[in-house]
Image (tube, rainbow, N blue to C red):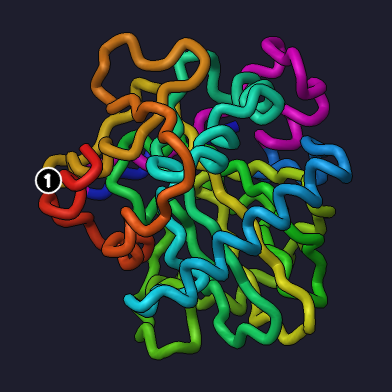
Amino acid sequence: MSREPITLGDRVFQFSPVNIENSRTLSRDQLQQFNENGYLSGISIFTESEASELQHYIEQLVTQVVTAADQRNSYSINNYHVVCQRLYDLVVEPRILAYIEDILGTELVCWSSHLFAKLAGDSKVVPLHQDAVYWPLTPSHSVTAWLAIDDADAENAAMQFVPGSHLSGAQVHEMQPLDGSRVLGRQVLNPDQYTDRFINVLQAGQLSLHSDLLLHGSDANDSSRNRCGLTLRYIPASVRVMEGFEVWRKSAVHCLDGDASDYWYNRRRPEGENPEKLADFWGEFDGQSLSPTSADRFA
């Protein structure tokens, strides 16, 4: 299934196929699809009333962030689970972890969360990219759970996946200027060659899962509807960060059997909602390492 590992410096980029014999929540067919395509879509997690309540919470959180005096934007809500109890509870939500367990096992860490709030009329695109090239983790074995806060479809810029692209290791990316037209600064080389794309249509409260080696991106949201999605990023506890990026361990939460080695931090459940505590973290999501000074503020 997977090809020879591709290395970049000391990092290893190789997809690790899921053992379909270990299925408990996902079906064997679903696990086989994940192995072949690099993603699963349309997984229902929350009821309609639960999804509506979550949507209201996220709308309030986004409003609080974008109206703050420090001029954060709708993409600034990165790793807020360390200060927002509601987001922390989503990280450890048993209904989500049941699916992650089938893919990654029980010794789990959620090392990051990020709200991609693509609001109505947002002209920014997310260039076609692989998450693994951004993240100083090795080996590449992170799975993103993308929880739809709003209904997502082609009209309001649902994510686009390139099926099977996770099997080719690390792709060459080029830097693009962060000039206000895009959210991320790295784009796979010659993105127009990838014409076979899956539109990740989701209803609010549904989930998709994708490998960190899968090419994906999204268009501008020219519609009158928001398209917010919360990404929860899980890894087996055996994954490590590259030297010099140890601060990336600090937002981690142990899940299920956790990390017996205690290499990864284990964030406690925060008390209440305090998004203002992470006001100076908003730039990290584009692959920039956090400064030790700011990270120590919530250590």
Q: Residue at x 67, y 59 (%)?
A: 161
x%, y% of residue 56?
Answer: 71, 57
- Residue labelled with disc 1: 244
Q: Depth check: 84 or 119 in front?
A: 84
Vertical relation: 169 (above or below) 88: below
**Residue type at mark 1?**
Gly
x%, y% of residue 62?
Answer: 56, 66
Q: Residue at x 80, y 72 (%)?
A: 154
Q: Depth check: 67 or 8 in front?
A: 67
Q: Residue at x 54, y 17 (%)?
A: 105
Quadrant location, the C terminus: top left
Q: Depth check: 272 or 283 in front?
A: 272
- Give the quadrant of residue 220: bottom right
Q: Is residue 85 magenta?
A: no
- Give the quadrant of residue 289: bottom left
In this picture, which residue range is highlighted in magenta?
Answer: 9-35
Q: Is residue 22 magenta?
A: yes
Vertical relation: 199 (above or below) 125: above
x%, y% of residue 174?
Answer: 36, 75
Q: Is residue 287 visible?
A: no
The tally of labels here is 1
Label 1, residues with CA under 10 Å away: few <14, some 14-19, many ≥20: few
Vertical relation: 141 (above or below) 172: above
Residue at far right of view: 48
Quadrant location, the N terminus: top right
Left or right of 270? Residue 244 is left
